Image: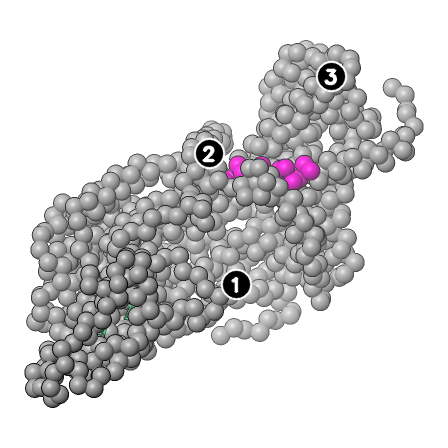
Amino acid sequence: MQIESPNILLIVVAAVVMVLYVFTNSAVLVWVERKVSAHIQRRPGPFEVGPFGLLQTAIDGLKLMAKQLIIPGKADKRLFMLAPVLSFVPPIAALLTVPFGKVVQVQNLDIGILFILSLAALNVLAILIAGWASANKYSLFGAVRSVAQNIAYEIPLLLSLLTAVLWMGTLNLGELVDAQGGFWFVFTPFGFVAFLIYFVTGMAETNRAPFDLPEAESELTAGFHTEYSGMGFGLFFLGEYTNMILVSAIATSLFLGGYNLPFVTLNGEGVLWELIRVLIFLAKAYFLIFVMIWMRWTFPRVRFDQLLNLCWKVLIPFSLVNLAAAAIWIKAVGG
Amino acid sequence: MLNYFKEIFVGIKSLLIGMKVTAFYGTKRTITAHYPFEKIPVTLNFRGHIDLVVTKKGYHKCITCGMCERACPSGCITLDSVKPEGAKKKKLTGYTLDFTKCSLCGNCVETCPTNAIKYSNDYYLVGTSRHDFHFDLLDRAMKAAEEMGIEWTEPVEKPKEPKEPQAEGGESPSPAGA
Amino acid sequence: MIQKPDPTQETLVLNMGPQHPSTHGVLRVVLHCDGEYVLDAEPVIGYGHRMHELIGEVRDHRGFYANVGRMDYGGALSFGHGHILAVERMLPDLEVPERAEYLRVITTELNRVASHLLWFGAFLLDLGAFTPILYSFDDREAILDLLEHVTGARLTFSYMRVGGVCADVDKDWCDGVLAFVKRMRDRIPMYHKLVSGNIIFRKRVEDVGLITRDMALKYGCTGPVIRGSGIPYDVRRSEPYSIYPELDFDIPTSERCDCMGRYDVRWAEIEQSLRIIEQAIAKLPEGPVMAEKVPKVIKAKGEVYQAVEAARGSLGYYIACDGSTSPYRMKIRVPSYSNLSILKELTRGILLSDLVAVMGSFDLVIPEIDR
Ligand code: SF4
Ligand code: SF4
């Protein structure tokens, strides 16, 4: 392992590409979400604008941009404007370290997973700021809930990731993928449990139903983004979808073998192989996203004390036992 | 302890069952009608706003008794009639329905002694001002007759001597009857 | 009344409503919160007051037909049923044909099923599940189609008439109703799979909003709220009216007393309503649907109180007439009003999320409360 000096130009270009990717990704994901939810509810969903309504989200985005940004009179203006940006930028930065393919990875950090987690933790800060700065009681409730929720899910989230890190013995995302090869971590019992725990907590991380407590529109109208309009709201929206792709990307690289097929390691050289690898990676990530969408449109919302209960009484014990078991297994059998 | 695991197991199972249900319906055909392009047929008994019945001869049946006007709880109906010099009956010159006030109770249709009004099947009403819903039913009846290919023909009344005693009785049943 | 917040208590006053997604209309609840805990919930009503009772006093009896449906958009037919039963009781000469009574009951029960389906969807929406409401609306649409065929309207049916009903049905319609009963019976297991068994749902409603028997009696709760507390009170049985004595059906109750109990009761009621519909269709006699000698102008005299079982509970019309064409006094006792009044005591110290669940489990229809 040698320390590479980061190539600034590459990072800038990649960041721009990533922003573009995030925009299109969100547009497509919104479309997918609307289509999936519509079909689950036996409606056709958007199909008026463009083929199969594909341009609907683009138009919606334009509409959001054209809308007036209303800042409530009593709001803390600077913080109010900062919060959407804060919810939107960190996930993009985190995505820069995700190994979509062997080469398609902007920056392979030795502490990649740590880097991602620390950026992801900023999300709760964004929500807290948004809720506080809005000067709205519902927003404040949303913010407070978000913090409570964060305390609940961060620990099992970390523990479950720790299991994977312990198993493979590295924090480097690229190496994590390679260490699994064709034998995905999820195929081992420890990996399976850790994956389930990670998936549940990951959904909480994205603030989506059934864990959309900070928004909870039937309780808190729209929670922390009640007061946001136009692109302020749009950025929160983008942030949510970017978080979704981030969470599934981590799950894919840590548990689902990244760009490898089950029991087949793809080591070919060349652009074509790389393309295949990227596609495989994205297919897995988007499948996870699909499951998230599916769950969102099936389940009611949990109550926040129940989320805490779930976390402290189920997820943490399970992930601790799982971690310990994995450690013992590694000692005894030799990993 | 056993309960603890049982609850987790039952819980996960119930979630999976729920997801199965939504997956099942997700693959089925959609059941909505795409409204502006696809219309659901209106049932024959649908009660829209009222309309004058057009007879085969191409006229309405209203005898301008005013029962509907009185029966309407919301006061939507305004009748205009004249009694031409020397005629036996009053003649309907205007039948206006203020549909903005109508509660579709059906009292007017039910009280009409000659069944001169019926419910229309107009479901797809839209307007840009409230005046769009002040319907001139006489006008509508004429148009309807035209569409049906019937000529609007006023029955010619034989001129009678004025003040014929039975003319008053036959004109309209007393509203306060019974 | 609403107390001024005490700043030393460090509580937060939260205005829930009049525009809020889960107050189902223009209900305002003033909450005193300590964090997410509700210390005090004070419902403020009257935002949708439309003077229906007064309108009933200035119009003649027929003129009120259309108003009854506007009070409770969910179960308009039972509101009509109560009204005409009250007026008919003041007209002793009037003989309502059997067939009309049967049709009244069939349509009312269909309406009850539709109302419960609407409640089911809205309740789940309150709890954050978006999909069930669309499934239940699928079934509800089928009911509304049937009702549209006979009443001519889909929501505010003015179907009941003094002396009968305004439209007759044919064989096809009866077959359609039976087909619907079958379809609904097939769908019920799906609802239970999707929702009733769901662990998240159960956690949200079990042991939430406990209404003890005493409390339910004290506040005059009726309908599924009191039956969910284990008291088998149903106007259809306790003060039988119409043809209900001739029909065989149970009064489902639940001893759970919580939101889950009310939920169970409503589903059981849907099943009972389907039973009633089936029996009534089988027994449907031939004949006219309107009494022969209905006075053109109704001049009732006397004083009646007629209660019927609406979808939300006991609905009572008190009408006093002095022999003129319109009532001297009309008072309507609506179930949601008493059911709502329990909210203050019930929600002391519960979580905001539970408050939403509790209000959802009452099946409140605010226009009915405000009248
Ligand atoms: S339906 Fe009722 S409200 Fe409408 S015009 Fe006729 S009587 Fe008046
Ligand atoms: S009740 Fe019938 S006949 Fe009399 S005025 Fe009205 S529409 Fe004409």
- On whether ligand 1 comes within 8 Å of the CB at mark 3, the answer is no
Looking at this rendering, what residue extends furthest in the bottom direction?
A: B163
The kind of secondary structure element at disc 3 is helix
The residues colored magenta run A24-38
Question: Per the image, is B139 magenta?
Answer: no
Q: Compare residues C293 and C301 and report the one nearer the observer.
A: C293
Q: Between C50 and A172, which is closer to the camera in this rendering?
A: C50
On the image, which quarter does residue A105 sit in?
A: top right
Residue tagged 2: B26
Number of the label disc, if any, that sits on residue C19: 1
Residue for point 69% across, 55% down: A66
Residue type pointed to by label 3: Leu
Whether residue A35 appears in magenta in the rendering, the answer is yes
Look at 79% across and 21% down and name the residue there: A103
Do dots 3 and 1 share one subunit?
Answer: no
Drawn side of residue A118 relative to residue A31, left or right: right
**In the image, what residue occupies the spot 29% across and 65% down?**
B141
Q: Amino acid at mark 1?
A: Gln
Same chain shared by disc 3 and disc 2: no
> Label 3: which residue?
A272
- Find the distance from the CA under tag 3 to the CA under tag 2: 35 Å
Reply above or below: C79 against A325.
Answer: below
Gap in Å between the C-alphas at discs 3 and 1? 56 Å
Q: Chain of mark 3?
A: A
Instruction: Bin the neighbour count of mark 1 within 10 Å (Cα to Cα): few under 14, some 14-19, many 20 and up.
Output: some
Q: Position of residue C170 (x, y in %)?
A: 17, 49
- A95 relative to C222, above or below: above
**Ligand 2 - quadrant of the structure image:** bottom left
Say which quarter of the image contains residue C75. bottom left
The answer for which chain carries disc 2 is B
